[in-house]
Amino acid sequence: MSIVRLHFYGFIAGFLLDLLVGDPHWFKAHPVRLMGSLYSALDKAFLGPKSDSGHKAEARGQLDLLEYVQGLFTIALTALLSVLAGAGILYACFKVNEYLFIAAEAFLTCTCLSTASLIRETSPVKKALRQNDIQTARKRLSYVVGRDTDRLRSTEIIKAVIETLAENLSDGIISPLFYLAIFGPCGGLFFKAVSTGDSMIGYKNDRYFSFGRAAAKTDDILNFLPARISAFLIVLSAVFSRKLSAGDAAKAYRNDHKKTESPNAGCPESAIAGALGIELGGAAFYGGKLIERPVLGIFSREAELDDIGRAQRIVVSASVFMEIICAVVLYLTWFLDN
């Protein structure tokens, strides 16, 4: 079989594997876990033991060139080792058997995606709210968001869940699928290395203002196009649901996607807010400090519990649409290659 054909099968199998069983975080040699361990080791080696550095976006100052270069080296080394490891595994499997290559690509693809995991991690919050257990809902929400959750009301919890679903649709599903489709597992691993770096050191606080700058900017660049694809897929998902508004999703995206500090976060968040007919964003507490954030979306009503389920369905349908689009492109490539 041609390499394009093998990639086609592995890409589809990996997506289905993620949908069925989710990301295998229990696996001790999980690529993202290894990336995180390397980031932590290099972080400590360059900057010393960690200390409280304040909120992730509150520091301002002049860029320290040495720390910037150290951070650039950290993300470059992690990305390089991730790609080389993935390439080595695929090459070794290909030499043994083509079907083993497909299995290896499917597994590596699965580790780069988080569709099932995202649904699994947000569902306990929905369950707790349905049982009117606000304390459990706040606790479970704290596992998936960075803001303070101990004072949130039910409506604020619902909005926080929807925001994290929208953000992770782009960062954890659409972006990886984009790079997996084009460059195979090595592309997916490269993206995950950058994304993991951004989530660990890409903050504008006292510790990472310079050290994490390269990770944050590289992540912004890699997510730029997929974030906008995510917004389109949310609109497309809304077309097929009577309870969602595709028109309002598109309108909210046009009006609000540039309001956020991040060049990408506002794309899926504004689109999903418009689709649901609610507003997201607004002030929130981080590390005990009130942070003002822009309001996104079109207010038709207050967010309600069922909106979490609707947002989860948007995540799954948008993921499936992206997979179908990528699979069709790969199939055409395979067809034209013959």
Image (cartoon, rainbow, N blue to C red):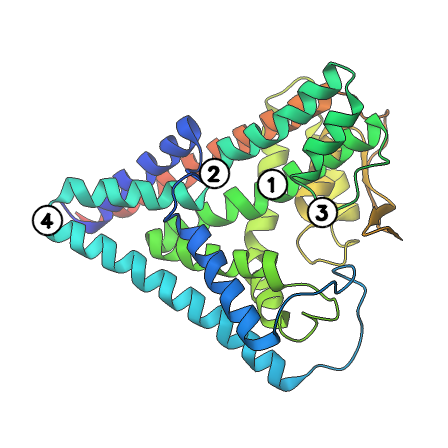
Q: Disc 3 vs disc 4: which is toward the camera? A: 3
Q: Which residue is mark 1?
A: 232
User: What kind of element bears circle 1?
Assistant: helix
Residue 146 got which mark?
A: 3
Q: In this view, which residue lies farthest toward the left?
A: 96
Are discs 2 and 4 less than 8 Å apart at CB? no
Q: Nearer the viewer, residue 173 or 35?
A: 35
Dot in front, 1 or 2: 2
The mark that comes first in sequence, 4 or 1, is 4
User: Does residue 310 appear in this view?
Assistant: no
Q: Earlier in the sequence, mark 1 or mark 2?
A: 1
Label located before the other in sequence (2 or 3): 3
Three-letter amino acid code at the position of disc 2: Met
Disc 1 versus disc 3: nearer the observer: 3
The amino acid type of the residue labelled 1 equals Phe
Q: What number is the disc on residue 322? A: 2
Position of residue 172 measured from the top left corner of the image (x, y, whole percent): 53, 45
Compared with residue 247, is residue 129 higher up or lower down, i.e. above or below? above
| Residues at discs 1 and 2 in contact (Cβ within 8 Å) | no
Q: Secondary structure at mark 3?
A: loop
Q: Which residue is mark 4?
A: 96
Neighbour class for label 4 at 10 Å: few (<14), some, many (≥20)? few
Within-10-Å neighbours for mark 1: few <14, some 14–19, many 20+: many
Q: Position of residue 49 (x, y in %)?
A: 62, 69
